[in-house]
Amino acid sequence: MCAAYLQGGLVKLHDFPGAVAEMAHAGLAPAPLFAALVILLELGASALILTGRWRWLGAVALSGFTLLATLLALRFWELPPGQERFMAANAFFEHLGLAGGFLLVAWLDLTERQPTEQYATEPRQP
């Protein structure tokens, strides 16, 4: 799940002017600040997920980022009917699924760390 974010963060890091241009194209200002924040988020949150340290936080961060970026960049409803709209709509809903997947990762991480009531009250077997 993190592959696209690792790749995106590394590409932006190695082509920072391109990352700044991408932020400016999306209407985000100041573009250099947003480019740096996106790089930090994509790489940092991916690292949290992959290392298991605060995995839930990394997953929630990438879910929120994906949702916001999707709403900003894939506004298929504004496009005229045709192939471009069809492709944008498919990408939009794929990204919604990815955001949901990250929420599932966060939920599983949090629930696995906390014992349920059933297990907390049962005595341990020798």
Image (cartoon, grey):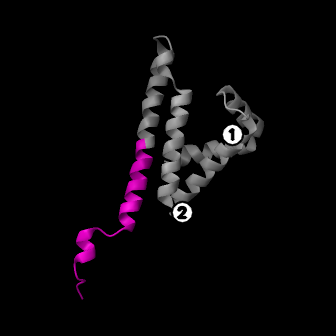
Please tell me whether the stretch drawn in magenta is mainly helix, strand or loop.
helix
- Camera-side mark, 1 or 2: 1
Up the image or down, 90 lies above or below 33; here it is above
Point out the tag, 1 or 2, that comes first from the N-terminus: 1
Which residue shows up at 24% across the image and 76% down it?
Answer: 121
User: Quick check: 107 left or right of 47?
Assistant: left
Which numbered marker is on residue 51? Answer: 2
Tell me: residue 104, above or below residue 32.
below
Is residue 123 covered in magenta? yes
- Between marks 1 and 2, how big is the CA–CA gap? 25 Å
Q: Residue 106's image quarter?
A: bottom left
Identify the residue shown where x is 73% and y is 35%. 30
Expressed as whole percent of the image width and height from the top left, the position of residue 46 reads 56, 53
Across and down, in percent, residue 72 comes to: 55, 29
Magenta stretch: give its range: 100-126
Q: Which quarter of the figure has residue 23?
A: top right
Q: Dividing the image into 4 quarters, which one contains the C terminus?
A: bottom left
Q: Position of residue 17 (x, y in %)?
A: 77, 36
Q: Residue type at mark 1: give it.
A: Phe
Q: Residue at x 73, y 30 (%)?
A: 21
Q: For numbered disc 2, what is the local secondary structure?
A: helix
SS label for mark 1: helix
Left or right, 66 with respect to 112, comes to right
| Label disc, if present, on residue 34 of the rendered structure | 1
